[in-house]
Image (cartoon, rainbow, N blue to C red):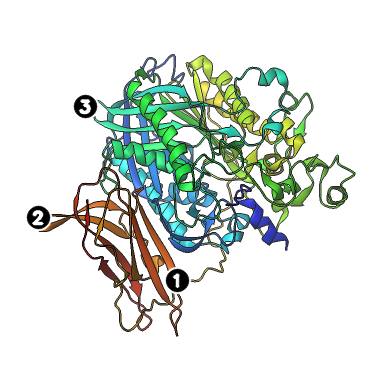
Amino acid sequence: MQRSSRCLLLGALVLALGSCSPEFPSDEDSNLDTQQAGLTGPCAGNTSFQVGSGIYDITGPAAELGMMGYAMIDQKTAGIHQRLRARAFVLASPCNGKRLVFVSADLGQIFQGVKQQVVERLQARYGAMYSDANVMLSATHTHSGPGGFSHYALYNLTILGYDKQNFEAVVDGIVQAVVRAHTNLAPGSIRVTSGDLLNASINRSPEQYLYNPAPERSQYGYDTDKKMTLLRLQGSDGTEVGTINWFAVHATSMGNDNLLISGDNKGYASYLFEKAKGTNYLAGKTFVAAFAQSNEGDVTPNIFGGTNGGGANDFESVELSGGKQYTLAKSLYDGASTLLTGAVDYRHTHVKMDAVQVAPQYAGGTARTTCTAAIGISMLAGAEDGPGFGSEGNTCAQVENLWNAFTCAVTTTPCQSEKPVVLEMGSMTPYPWTPEVLPLQVATVGNLALVAVPFEMTTMAGRRLRQAVLNQLAPIGVNQVVIAGLSNAYAGYLVTREEYTKQDYEGASTHFGPWTLAAVQQESEKLAAALRDDASVPAGPTPRDLRNEQTTLQTGVVFDDKLLTVSFGSVATNASASYTRGQTVSVKFWGAHPKNNLRRQGSFLEVQRKSGTSWVTVAYDWDWETKYKWQRNNCVPTFACSHVTIEWKIPSTATPGTYRIRHDGDWKSGWDGAIRPYTGYSREFTVN
């Protein structure tokens, strides 16, 4: 299998160029003294929090929609292996009346339009209680989810434009998860712990990492961050509310030839933890386990190099990577005993990232500026875990390379320095193809700080930013800082100045030039200092709202058809009479297009076991042992027929007995346009 790790931009560039919880006063209305929330004031020594969790389905169209991540125009959804979820947490400190929302979503990115409309809908429901400042949305960075939910052109090119249905599934699902977490808010505690996971990641750009100064590198034992930081949320009554952990690794165990929706290794790890805790995905209140993303920019799960994650296929590689993350997280969770101490607080601003004046102390003693957003030639080459076109390391210093020399002479500005610019997204009209006004956010939950960045940060870039924020917040008792990656918006990668010199894939994908990290560090330190000093910060410029400026080449479902001799839900290929554990049951139905009804908070399939005269469901389309596969069947004359194949790999723990496979779907009439449900069943079969 050939896989591309050029992530979401490569293919795009090729196309472009050729109920209520306990209430707290809002921040505006609160007259509580919030100064020095860690060591002094009303929250000094506080360990009493309010915690709430919620989970909701955000799975978009399971057929004929381009996937978000690898930018392969022919990688379109054709079924479901795992449903995608938004996992939300509300963390509040009654001592100062503040609360923070943290959401980890099984998405490739959190795009700016998603954050805008999530906050807008929360404010319509709760008023000023939630805002940009205290809502933090982070993506796990799975590359196996449907795309088309950005409002910026570059990220929709290989999807063939904006997809309203998927955007709505994402936004509404996140909102519903937050609503559940808000409703479930109750007194509790938050425990923190951490541990190293040594066999689940490698640096995919090790030569680039070596461009960082040797004295700096000598401070660290590895060229990727191995530390997993975990929170255990528990109610005062002993109820286990949920857990969040941050560990830096790309969710790319599934390759670019996969067509089944999947949360990849982080989604699988969440599934394992939630299954162990008896999570009910349909319940309003249940245990939630988030495996959140951090500074994974140069970190791959393919620990044997290239695209090799250690499994015989991508599914096994997901099991290996996700299983390792789950095993450590479960061990940390079970042993967590240290209480977070202090308060919830936060600062947020928007920054015009293409025009930041970087002070000399952040940029080697000379005042610098950031640049109009652009990407370089090396972005086309992809990264080490999946080459694209050409090679990495193309710089303007390579005058012997005629293409580099030509590109640097014609398209590259001095601001972008070593980068041979191949596309300047920031100068496109009537709107830039990528966002230029971006959010930065720093929050504290007791003595833990979260730094939300709208980038994929490399290992060393993340280390520098963490230390910079820690230096500002240590005086108020903060002793741990976590990078919450791919948060609140998305604008490519973020590397160190030294790594940028190399112009590997990550450097070429750093939009705003060589001093971007310096700018982010400078502005994040301002937020952290304001939080420390209980000072306000300016809101910054308002980002563009492009919801009404979207175009698409996507086609909806015109109608569904079938042969005259069958009905929707009829079996085309039936199950065998009997199976043993470990075998796979496969049943093919005459079906319809899944875009007719996404069945969020539902399922396209059920594996049912006979119990007396009743049938008990033992697996759904979100369970790891099942696969829902859709395929267009070009029946003459309409070419509008569909086949749906349901697979169930019988677990070793399956109870012997009589089973059947149920398929539910919805078909669209070509006569009246109505969408109607249908159900089909396989024959009964035995599991021995």
Question: Helix, strand, or loop for circle 3?
Answer: loop
Instruction: State which mark lies toward you, 1 or 3.
Output: 1
112 shown above or below 523: below
Q: Marks 3/2: CA distance?
A: 38 Å
Name the mark nearer the viewer: 3 or 2.
2
Give the labeled residue for mark 1: 632
Res 276 → quadrant:
top left
Left or right: 195 as drawn, with respect to 526: left
Image-based side of 527 in relation to 56, left or right: right
* Residue placed under numbered mark 3 in the picture: 237
Q: Quadrant of residue 365?
A: top right
Residue flagged by tag 1: what amino acid is it?
Answer: Arg
Crowd around label 1: few <14 · some 14–19 · many ≥20 (10 Å): some
Residue 45: x and y in percent read: 37, 14
Q: Residue at x 46, y 18 (%)?
A: 36
Of circles 1 and 2, which is in front?
2
Give whichever of discs 1 and 3 has the lower sequence position. Answer: 3
Mark 3 closeness class: few <14, some 14–19, many ≥20 residues within 10 Å: few
Amino acid type at image mark 2: Gly
Earlier residue among tags 3 and 2? 3
CA–CA distance in space, label 1 to label 2: 38 Å
Q: Residue at x 39, y 27 (%)?
A: 231
Residue 567, located in which quarter of the rendered image?
bottom left
Name the residue tied to disc 2.
612
Which of these two is toward me, 601 or 444? 601
Q: Secondary structure at mark 1?
A: strand
Q: Nearer the viewer, residue 447 or 393?
A: 393
The three-letter amino acid code for the residue at tag 3 is Asp
Q: Secondary structure at mark 2?
A: loop
